[in-house]
Image: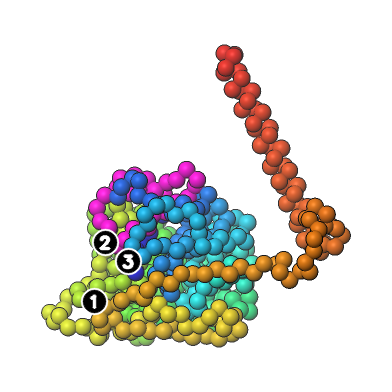
């Protein structure tokens, strides 16, 4: 809980987060303040821009990233800081045919990661083996957001087709859905709350920003619906389940609104607004384990500016220096509640809670070990080389896929050869002075 990430090629003091190979991101210790050296080591494994990142809730050194290169990658970040560029991920997850825009870890099961891409496909992986466990193609259009519920038995999604869906991943089906929870056509966001309801942000038909609270067992009428203001910025919700509070940050806004969700009307209570002079280009939210309990800090957000990243702390003033039990109920700890196989078999467990009374002390770094299964291990051993394998013995689907890949590779080689010839001709013309 001592590092944060800058990605999507933001400008940071001292230089851009860029690399010659494609997408890169920067991992900085929380104690690192001030100007960042332009030669500071980057994470540079992706060949396209990085679109989303997510720290593992069960290991503070493990980070997942999704990119325009159609892959998701899992990284092991050293305890203190990077001393040299990191280009080798622990595992590369390849299964999407278009860019991967969403990565999110399962809240209670070890090594379970969900990815969603522009191919409208959701894949749930076991990163310990590098294998896809579940694939869902129920969305006909681009997926805007995904949020697990507290025990990871369900997740909710918002989509460009203006539907809010609740999905059961182990059944690979949509168990509930609502058309147009907000009447506007602009993007929506949705998150599960601690008590199982769904909090949404969207737009009215008149392009006013709007909040909603819904019971997924009865989508007919909202529990609460609240209009805010008129603005183009999509409201991004960050949820604190311990305090049952939601922080709303709009891209391009210069303010952060926060609300409390209760069981009494009006259910979504406006609390206050944090305002500043500069608009935010992005926002990050620190898990409760990272806050400073000695200063009565209940939340910390990281606001991305054009040329800096600014921490914003939310505190509740108290005169006493003693630990404030009412501010810090037990929170989700770093230990997973179950293994991937248990979750896949249908088991559900709430997060294992820890006390923040003496502050959070992270456990020793645990290395994520990936044990990929070799499909060749299950085949009878043979002395024949691959060039002498009888293609008639291959399954028709596999043979068709291999032939298709071979044709694609041949087409790529031909196109590159043509490009090389064109470049050689241009070079020859410049050399001879004819160009």
User: Where is mark 1, residue-wise?
Assistant: 293
How is the rendered protein coloured?
Answer: rainbow
Disc 3 to disc 2, C-alpha distance: 8 Å
Residues packed near mark 2 inside 10 Å, few (<14), some (14 to 19) or many (20 plus): few
Residues packed near mark 1 inside 10 Å, few (<14), some (14 to 19) or many (20 plus): many
Lower sequence index among marks 3 and 1: 3
User: Where is mark 3, residue-wise?
Assistant: 2
**Magenta stretch holds residue 30:** yes
Residues packed near mark 3 inside 10 Å, few (<14), some (14 to 19) or many (20 plus): some
Q: Position of residue 102 (x, y in %)?
A: 51, 63
Checking the image for residue 31, the label placed there is 2
Lower sequence index among marks 1 and 2: 2
Checking the image for residue 88, the label placed there is none
Disc 1 to disc 2, C-alpha distance: 17 Å
Residue placed most toward the observer, 279 or 109: 109
Which residues lie in the magenta part?
9-35
Residue visible at 80% across and 63% down in the picture: 382
Q: Position of residue 266 (x, y in %)?
A: 35, 80
Would residue 248 be seen by someone viewing this image from the given angle?
A: no
Label 3, secondary structure: give it.
loop
Q: Position of residue 249 (x, y in %)?
A: 35, 63
Residue visible at 68% across and 34% down in the picture: 417
Number of disc labels: 3
């Amino acid at each position: 809980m001592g590092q944060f990430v800058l990605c999507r090629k933001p400008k940071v003091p001292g230089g851009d987060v860029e690399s010659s190979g494609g997408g890169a991101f920067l991992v900085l210790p929380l104690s690192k303040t001030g100007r960042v050296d332009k030669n500071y080591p980057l994470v540079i494994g992706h060949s396209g821009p990085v679109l989303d990142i997510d720290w593992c809730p069960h290991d503070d050194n493990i980070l997942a990233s999704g990119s325009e290169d159609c892959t998701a990658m899992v990284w092991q970040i050293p305890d203190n800081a990077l001393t040299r560029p990191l280009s080798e991920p622990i595992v590369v997850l390849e299964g999407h045919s278009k860019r991967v825009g969403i990565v999110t870890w399962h809240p209670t099961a070890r090594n379970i990661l969900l990815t969603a891409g522009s191919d409208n496909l959701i894949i749930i992986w076991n990163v310990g083996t590098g294998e896809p466990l579940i694939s869902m193609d129920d969305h006909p259009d681009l997926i805007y957001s995904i949020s697990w519920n507290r025990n990871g038995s369900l997740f909710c999604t918002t989509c460009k087709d203006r539907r809010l869906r609740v999905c059961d991943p182990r059944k690979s089906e949509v168990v509930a859905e609502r058309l147009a929870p907000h009447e506007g056509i602009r993007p929506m966001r949705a998150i599960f709350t601690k008590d199982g309801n769904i909090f949404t942000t969207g737009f009215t038909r008149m392009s006013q920003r709007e909040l909603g609270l819904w019971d997924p067992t009865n989508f007919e009428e909202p529990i609460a619906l609240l209009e805010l203001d008129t603005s183009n910025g999509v409201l991004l919700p960050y949820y604190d389940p311990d305090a049952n509070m939601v922080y709303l940050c709009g891209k391009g806004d210069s303010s952060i609104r926060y609300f409390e969700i209760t069981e009494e009307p009006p259910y979504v209570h406006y609390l206050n607004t944090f305002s500043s002079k500069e608009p935010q280009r992005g926002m990050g939210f620190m898990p409760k384990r990272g806050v400073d309990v000695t200063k009565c800090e209940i939340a910390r957000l990281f606001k991305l500016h054009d040329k800096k990243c600014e921490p914003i702390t939310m505190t509740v003033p108290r005169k006493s220096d003693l630990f404030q039990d009412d501010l810090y109920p037990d929170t989700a700890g770093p230990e997973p509640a179950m293994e991937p196989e248990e979750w896949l078999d249908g088991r559900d467990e709430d997060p294992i809670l820890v006390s923040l009374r003496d502050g959070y002390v992270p456990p020793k770094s645990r290395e994520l070990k990936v044990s990929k299964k070799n499909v060749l291990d299950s085949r009878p051993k043979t002395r024949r080389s691959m060039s002498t394998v009888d293609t008639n013995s291959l399954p028709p689907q596999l043979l068709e896929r291999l032939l298709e890949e071979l044709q694609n590779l041949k087409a790529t080689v031909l196109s590159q050869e043509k490009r090389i010839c064109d470049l050689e001709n241009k070079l020859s013309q410049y050399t001879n002075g004819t160009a």
